[in-house]
Amino acid sequence: AACPSAAADGFAQESVHEVSSLLQVSSRPAAKQEQTTPDVLRDIIKNELGGRQAINWWNLPAQRSPEQLAECQSKLQNFENVTGTGLEWGVQYGGVGPALANNCTKVPGLFEHVPEALQGVFWMKGNAMNEELATFQMGQWFEEYRLFASPMGPFSWVWAGGTPKDPKALGVMYSPFVSGYATSALAVGHTTWVLRFLPCPGAGPGYPGSKCENGTGAAPEFTYAELSAHTLDNISMAGDQFGGATY
């Protein structure tokens, strides 16, 4: 008779313990959901920019000196004024382009805060357009939000002056009409690129181009970012080439 009683007592004690554990687990607060990038940008506009919605190259917290700009301009030739835009295009040949883009977008007061992953010059390998080189380092780093905003500005983007051997899409995008429109649209549209660094979400098995492994990218790593393009430098819009798209 003692055995069933002991078994019952033991069962009751275990049940109470299990229920208590379940209650403890269920009473924990739910994990905080990650803010969306548009929400983060709204916080930055309110808390960091005093309500200003545009991040342009001319309102960054530090600017290139007149001497730096003069030195950069002296390296270009064959200037062409783009009618109706107020912009001038200049030409340089050979391997000077990468060094020129790097040196002319390295701004004291900004560059020291740029994440290393975004420093330097990037080659757009395989791009069917006539865009060849890109820089992001002339921008503003919002460390608390792990977000970097890089407006297009003079010397930040480099286009090809001709058509390379074996171009993508049969070289159609290198034709003067198409390439002329593309270069003007990016520059005259005052595009601002926003990169928000996040933990890597992981990619499906065999997904081409995937570089980060599942679970990587949490601060302070920079292995994964959402990229959005904002026309007219207006980061208050969700992000596409005409207001908002996230890549």
Image: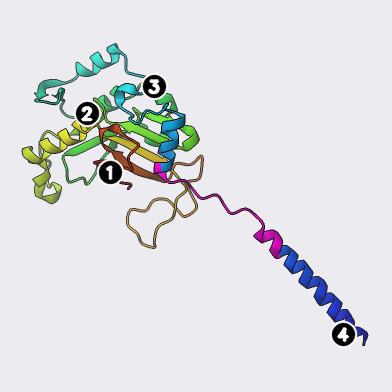
**In x, y percent, where is residue 233?**
29, 32
Q: Earlier in the sequence, mark 3 or mark 1?
A: 3
Q: Nearer the viewer, mark 3 or mark 2?
A: 3
- The residue wearing badge 1 is 240
**Residue 30 highlighted magenta (yes or no):** yes
Task: Name the secondary structure under disc 1.
Answer: loop
Q: Earlier in the sequence, mark 4 or mark 1?
A: 4
| Label 2 crowd bin: few (<14), some (14–19), many (20+), radius 10 Å | many
| Label 3 crowd bin: few (<14), some (14–19), many (20+), radius 10 Å | few
> Which mark, residue 61?
3
Disc 3 to disc 2: CB gap under 8 Å: no
Disc 2 to disc 1: CB gap under 8 Å: no
Residue at 9 percent of width and 50 percent of height: 170
- The residue wearing badge 2 is 97
Q: Is residue 128 left or right of residue 64?
A: left
Highlighted range, magenta: 22-38
Give 176 or 33, whichever is nearer the viewer: 33
Residue at 62 percent of width and 53 percent of height: 29
Q: How far apart are the alpha carbons under marks 4 and 2?
A: 87 Å
Task: Name the secondary structure under disc 2.
Answer: helix
Amino acid carrying label 2: it is Gly
Q: Earlier in the sequence, mark 3 or mark 2?
A: 3
| Label 1 crowd bin: few (<14), some (14–19), many (20+), radius 10 Å | some
Q: Earlier in the sequence, mark 2 or mark 1?
A: 2
| Label 4 crowd bin: few (<14), some (14–19), many (20+), radius 10 Å | few
- The residue wearing badge 4 is 4
Q: Residue 54's quadrant in the figure?
A: top left
Quarter of the image where the N terminus is located: bottom right
**In x, y percent, where is residue 141?**
42, 31
Residue at 13 percent of width and 20 percent of height: 77
**In x, y percent, where is residue 3?**
89, 84
